[in-house]
Image (cartoon, rainbow, N blue to C red):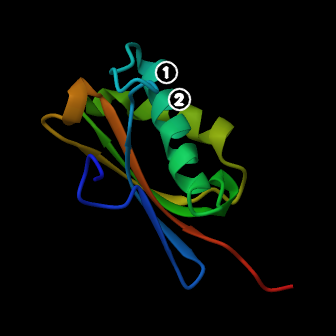
């Protein structure tokens, strides 16, 4: 039985829908530090994308959920290092809390261009 009642990522008709990837390490422990938390969430996002044979290059839309909206400038700078132009569309939302004490959660929609 899965730990959660949903798929970490789901592929349909060339699209990948990725459930929120938290700023936790591989043991499920919240990562301390602002930049470190952003990178941890991206690392977990990459792992989830891989389950549907996709990568960050396939991402077309992200939604960032953060517990501190002041992280926005750092998230913008980090986004520029993670995604090439044209960068995916993004929403950025502050929330009261995230599971496991995480400070960042990223969900994504990806698309695998199969046209030759």
How many numbered badges does the structure rendering display? 2
The residue at 67%/73% (across/down) is 112
Q: Do the residues labelled 1 and 2 touch (CB within 8 Å)?
A: yes
Residue for badge 2: 39
Asked if 31 appears above or below 72 in the picture, the reply is above
Q: Give how far across and how far down residue 51 sits, in percent.
A: 56, 56
Q: Give how far across and how far down residue 11 sits, in percent.
A: 51, 73
Circle 1 residues within 10 Å: few <14, some 14–19, many ≥20: some
For the residues marked 1 and 2, what is the alpha-carbon distance in whole angstroms?
A: 6 Å
Q: Residue 35 carries which label?
A: 1
Q: Give how far across and how far down residue 50 sits, in percent.
A: 61, 53
In the image, farthest residue toward the left? 96
Asked if 82 appears above or below 27 in the picture, the reply is below
Asked if 111 appears above or below 57 in the picture, the reply is below
Q: Give how far across and how far down residue 32 sits, in percent.
A: 37, 13
Q: Nearer the viewer, residue 66 or 72?
A: 66
């Amino acid at each position: 039985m899965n730990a959660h009642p949903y798929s970490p990522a789901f592929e349909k008709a060339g699209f990948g829908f990725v459930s929120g990837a938290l700023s936790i390490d591989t043991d499920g422990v919240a990562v301390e530090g602002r930049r470190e938390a952003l990178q941890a969430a991206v690392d977990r996002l990459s792992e989830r994308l891989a389950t549907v044979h996709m990568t960050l290059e396939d991402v077309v839309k992200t939604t960032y959920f953060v517990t501190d909206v002041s992280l926005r400038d750092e998230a913008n700078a980090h986004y520029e290092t993670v995604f090439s132009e044209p960068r995916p569309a993004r929403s950025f939302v502050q929330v009261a809390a995230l599971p496991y004490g995480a400070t960042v959660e990223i969900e994504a929609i990806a698309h695998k261009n199969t046209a030759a």
